[in-house]
Image (cartoon, coloured by chain):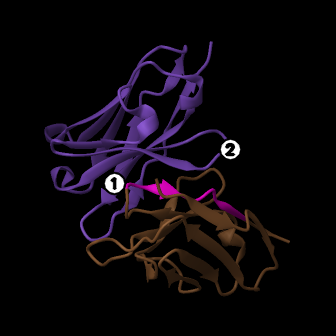
Chain colours: A brown, B purple
Amino acid sequence: DIVMTQSPLSLPVTLGQPASISCRSSQSLVHSEGETFLSWYQQRPGQSPRRLIYKVSNRDSGVPDRFSGGGSGTDFTLKISRVEAEDVGVYYCMQGTLWWTFGQGTKVEIK
Amino acid sequence: EVQLVESGGGLVQPGGSLRLSCAASGFRFSDHWMSWVRQAPGKGLEWVANIKQSERYYVDSVKGRFTVSRDDARSSLYLQMSSLRVDDTALYYCARLNYTGYRYFDHWGHGTLVTVSS
């Protein structure tokens, strides 16, 4: 099984400041098709997960452009350029290359 | 608008059974892979099962105990759970899996809570 490891697990951020979350996989996420199936989700308090990013760096429709994803192989990053109050919640990375596994989640809160 | 509405959760004793349902609308149900993802209280997300037509896949921890099925005519997804254990306690989400070329969950329901306790 592919294990996904996120860091940090807790991320206090000042409003308007950037934030960065790391996600590492236990093996390469490059699929035999040549694609890398790494996605990111946001779960606001009391809500269902919401998709943000798919295939490493593609923002879903309606996702603000302050969110960006990057990385390759086994190392990936979700960045928020300027954190807003509505960004509070838990963020999960997920791999879909070999079955589907999620990271532990990173809780983003306002300082 | 895509909508996924789960039902069927509740309190069940260890060793018992429960059947979850998910009513889908707003898209051509039969064209899509569908999934169950669960979240134990205060914990992270765990993929449980996928189904598309006759293809079914499960996480190892539920193999032999859970069965995923669907009724395309009713746009409904089901999860039959048996031999339930305390560690199956979770909020169970129905999710649409965008499989071909993407392999991620693009729509989620609000979840139905399953509590396994004596």
Q: From where the camera sits, is residue B2 visible?
A: no
Q: Residue at x 42, y 75 (%)?
A: A60
Q: Where is residue A63 in the image (x, y as percent from the top left)?
A: 49, 77
The x and y percentages for residue B6 are 41, 38
- Check chain identity for marks 1 and 2: say if they share one: yes
B61 left or right of A34?
A: right
Res B23 quadrant in image: top left
Determine which of the numbered discs, if any, sits on residue B66 in the image.
none
In magenta, the rendered stretch is: A99-107
Q: SS at mark 2?
A: loop
Label 1 SS: strand
Where residue B4 sits in the image (x, y, percent)? 36, 47
The C terminus of chain B is located in which quarter? top right
Q: Is residue B76 left or right of residue B84?
A: left
Residue labelled with disc 2: B42
10 Å crowding of disc 1: few (<14), some (14-19), many (20+): many
Q: Mark 1 points at which residue?
A: B96
Q: Mark 1 lies on which chain?
A: B
Amino acid on which disc 2 is placed: Gly
Above or below for B60 versus A38: above
Q: Magenta includes A105?
A: yes
**B97 versus A39 height, above or below:** above
Residue in the picture at 65% in, 39% down: B41
Q: Does the magenta stretch include residue B91?
A: no
**Between A70 and B8, which is closer to the camera in this rendering?**
A70
Q: Mark 2 lies on which chain?
A: B
Residue B55 in view here:
yes
